[in-house]
Amino acid sequence: MKRNYDIDLVGFKCPIPILKIRKKIRDLNKGDTLSIIATDKMIKIDLPIFCKESECRLIEMVDQGGQIFCKIEII
């Protein structure tokens, strides 16, 4: 059963968001998704690289007035 999880990274600066994402996905299963909200602009660079090097696929990334909403899928 695929599930969606959320992680709030508002206020955290690089490299903390990626470290927290890495820790969170250890508990997720293949097909699960993780919705992310962040404010550090570096996530726009770091997250695609992280997904490429991990067992994740970047589904979506939207910057709305300083808040960045992302969704990744565990593959």
Image (cartoon, rainbow, N blue to C red):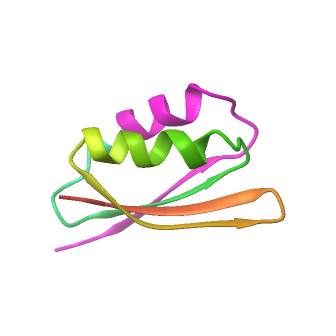
Instruction: Look at the image and say whether residue 8 sits in the magenta stretch.
Output: yes
2 within the magenta span: yes
Query: In the picture provided, is 13 more to the left or to the right than 49?
Result: right
> Residue most toward the top?
15
Residue extending farthest to the right is 65
The residue at the point 20 percent across, 67 percent down is 31
Give the x, y percent position of residue 26. Answer: 26, 39
Above or below 72: residue 39? above
Give the residue displayed 71% in from the left and 41% down from the top: 40
Q: Which residues are magenta?
A: 1-23
Q: Is residue 47 visible?
A: yes
Q: Is residue 6 left or right of residue 3?
A: right
Nearer-the-camera pick, 75 or 23:
75
Residue at x-position 76% and y-position 38%? 11
Provide residue 50's location: percent of width, then percent of height: 37, 40
- Quadrant of the frame with the N terminus: bottom left
Front residue (pair 24, 15): 15
Q: Is residue 26 visible?
A: no
| Residue 47 relative to residue 42: left or right | left
Identify whether 54 is placed above or below 75. Answer: above
Residue 75 picture location, percent across and down = 17, 58
In the rendered image, residue 71, in percent from the top left (x then y), is placed at 46, 64
